Image: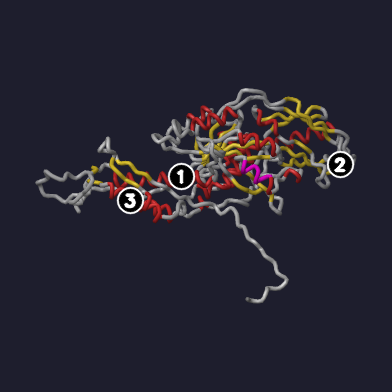
Amino acid sequence: MGVLFNFIPGAGLIAPGNFFEVNSGGQYESKSRGLILGHKSAAGSLASDTLTLCTTFAEAAALAGPGSQLYEAFRVARRAAPVHEIWVSAIPITGTPGAWTVTVGALPASGGDGVLEIAGRKVRLNVAAGATDDQVATSLAAAINAFVDPLTMAYLPVTATAATNVVTLTARHAGTTMNELEITSDPNLAGNILGPAGRITVAQTVPATGTASVAASLAALGDEPFDWIISPFGDTANLDAAETALSDISGRWAWNTQLYGHYLTVNTGNTGAQTTYGLARNGRHTTALARVASPTPSWEWLAQYVARQLPWLADDVGGNASRNMSDLVLEDVRPPRDRSLWPNYAVRNTLNGSRMSTWKVNGAGQVVVDKMITMQGVNAQGMPDTVFRDIQAIAQVMHGLRYMRAGLAQRHANKAIADANPANLPAISTPADIKADCIALYGDLVDRGLFENKAEFAKRVKVERDKANSARVNIGMDLDRVNPLDILAANATIYAQYPSAA
């Protein structure tokens, strides 16, 4: 076998010399980025629909504005995925910020401690004995504007002003998603003097308006790889835009693009509404989380739900991308206050069957992952097809195809093709060479825990020169992916006493 040179001429050199050319032997490294879409506030410097790498809370605050939808989504995502590469993009919005009034009524003359909850955050207030309602309102507005959790760096999605005994809360930006903010004084919180009926009254006085469009941000993806696109905008128009951007025919999954990616969103409603929503879609490049209204806003639910699973989905080396991810805790997400809304197995099973991703609540009252899936339920012929139901399948395909493509390019780029290579020239590849490398690369992917059954793959893979174009090689390969271990079923047969051996 000869030596293949890329720079040193193979012929024509006469004058003496010792020459070394330097080439890379190849070292594959995967990259699996997350991208968060959301609204920024006026305090954020990020231009609309501009994709920007963000690494810290401080950067997020500068780019998106503290307390904005985009800031808070990044914050909980970063807490769930401390080192994952996360980018952000500000979705522009034209509309009216929502507004609420908090009217202070008759409080105990003895004063005490009060708590007002906004988006699941507890704003604490000490009311001095004899304080007037107006004074309490002024103090409450100041506490709201000063709020920041020093441990989690959470801000509030509203700002406050006070006039007489009324605190007016205004959302930091427009957008209909802000209408879901929960503002309450929990009457079940022990010692909360604001909790009993009549102490304070909360009312939404200005509905938030403004419908978002993710189309421009999706177009801004360009030719950069973004595997996991986290977006709270799950209406029909935005899901349609996502499916267009990620199309297998003309989008990021097309054969001539090979950039891939997956759009993950959230929908809020009861089981009936969620099944209707899920069954209306059939896209393997989209995922929707079935949320029930709770103290935590939907954009924080979604961002932490996805980001909590990203470190595994992005790991193409140790088998993590194939794992079951149930029971991973979402530390910053609070469940619905009404325990009857916590989904039992029957509800979750129904939702999964309706193409919706699910969550549950563990024994400690924490929200945890149940099962994240895609929204594909049937194939192009309308027949049931679950090959791409598991989110793990999407990760495995992205990782696997990139690895195969990189490996084949490393071994066979800038080569000639011939049916046989009797002199074993390094500049020539044969179909047999390519087939052998396909099998070897698939073996690597088996070792990485993404696919299985190398021997069967070797039997099935086909490599042949194209009959109409002798410079083209066609490869047919069947890939058998590793499946998450979702269910262990055991038949426990109980005896009063084991029967005697026959």
| Cα separation between marks 2 and 1 | 61 Å
Helix, strand or loop at disc 1? helix
Residue type at mark 1 is Val
| Cα separation between marks 2 and 3 | 77 Å
Disc on the earlier residue, 2 or 3: 2
Helix, strand or loop at disc 2? loop
Q: Does the magenta run of residues contain 78?
A: no
Within 10 Å of disc 1 (Cα), the crowding (few <14, some 14-19, many 20+) is some
Disc on the earlier residue, 2 or 1: 2
Which residue is painted at 41% across and 35% down in the image? 257
- In the rendered image, which residue does mark 2 sit on? 111
Q: Does the magenta run of residues contain 348?
A: yes
Helix, strand or loop at disc 3? helix
Q: Give the range drawn in magenta.
A: 347-353
Residue type at mark 3 is Asp
Viewer-proximal residue among 144 and 86 = 86
- Label of residue 397 in the image: 1
Q: Along the horizontal axis of the image, is 218 left or right of 270?
A: left
Residue type at mark 2 is Gly
Which residue is painted at 85% across and 36% down in the image? 199
- Name the main secondary structure of what is drawn in magenta: helix
